Each structure stands twice: as C-alpha cells, then as structure tokens.
Amino acid sequence: MRALILTLSILAIIDSAHFAKAGLSSTPRETLAPADTAEATQETEEQIGLTKAKRRDVQRRLTRLGFDTKVNGKFDESTRAAIARWQEEYGYSSTGFLNAAQHKVLTDAAKLAGKSDRQDRRRAGGHARYSRGVGGPIGAIGGAVRGVGRGVGSAVGGLFRR
C-alpha cells in the first residue's frame, strides 16, 4: 500500500510539473472537479456494456484497491457501496454507478496497485509467505526434540535439523 501511495505521489508530481511553468491559477479551488464532470448513473453504466465477467473484474479491482466486495458478477448493495466509497475517495460524486471515464480510472488505478504489489513481493525475494527460519512448526518440533538428549529424541531431532 505504501508503494502505491508513493507511486501515485510521484506520478502526481511529474504530471503537475507543467503547472509550475504556467504560474498560479486564478480558478478558485471549489470549482476544480474531476476530469469527468458527467454524473454516473445506471444509464451510463449500461452504456459501458459490462458483462458478468467484466463486473467480476470491476469487483476484483475494487477489492485490490481496498474497497472490499464480494466477487460474484452481480452489482448488489455491497458492490454499489464499494463503488460509492471508491468514487468518494477519487473525488467523484458517490452514486454507486460507473460511467466510462470512471471505469477507466478504476482499471488503471487497480493495474498500478497490482504492479506495486508484485514489485513488493519481488523485493521481499518472492518468498514473503514461506518462512524458512526456525519459527515454523517443524522447526519448533525439531528444536524442542533436539534438546531432549540421546535416544529417540535425538533421532527425531536429527530428522529436522538443517
């Protein structure tokens, strides 16, 4: 998640570099809105043509971005709530429906999050889930049995030694 925030911050800085050259804006902040000012409705969502597979994809992308919802291909109440939370987070009016521009932003943001997740796993050596240290259950058994002494304990402990 930190990598996503860092990446988005860097992209925002790079994208806003042309504003520094242009000077101060005379537009009041309240009038600045997302690039897409058309409110998303059920009609705009139907125009996207989301099949059941594409709806599941939207649900997966929402979940990847931290807006958890059930991935079932149906835009039920929980999915509509997740879409509304996502819209609010990204500065859109939270209607719970998508339009084409919002769908693209959602897709791009989730792709970016997926790339940063893969980069984090690579940096961790690709084995972040699998501990090879003594802390695992087999290491604990081997360590406990190893200290017992000679006989059966040392034979079993020998099986688990590295």
Image (cartoon, grey):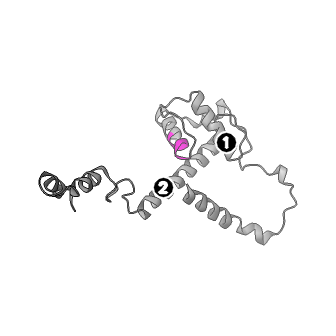
Residues rendered magenta in the picture: 60-65
Q: Position of residue 39 (x, y in %)?
A: 72, 38
Nearer to me, 43 or 61: 61
What amino acid does circle 1 point to?
Gln
Q: Which residue is mark 2?
A: 117
The disc placed on residue 96 is none
What amino acid does circle 2 point to?
Asp
Q: Quadrant of the N terminus?
A: bottom right
The residue at 56%/51% (across/down) is 108
Q: Quadrant of residue 131?
A: bottom left
Q: Which residue is mark 1?
A: 87
Q: Is residue 33 above or below residue 14?
A: above
User: Dot 2: what SS?
Assistant: helix
In the figure, is residue 96 to the left or right of 31?
left
The residue at 77%/72% (across/down) is 21
Q: Residue furthest front?
A: 149
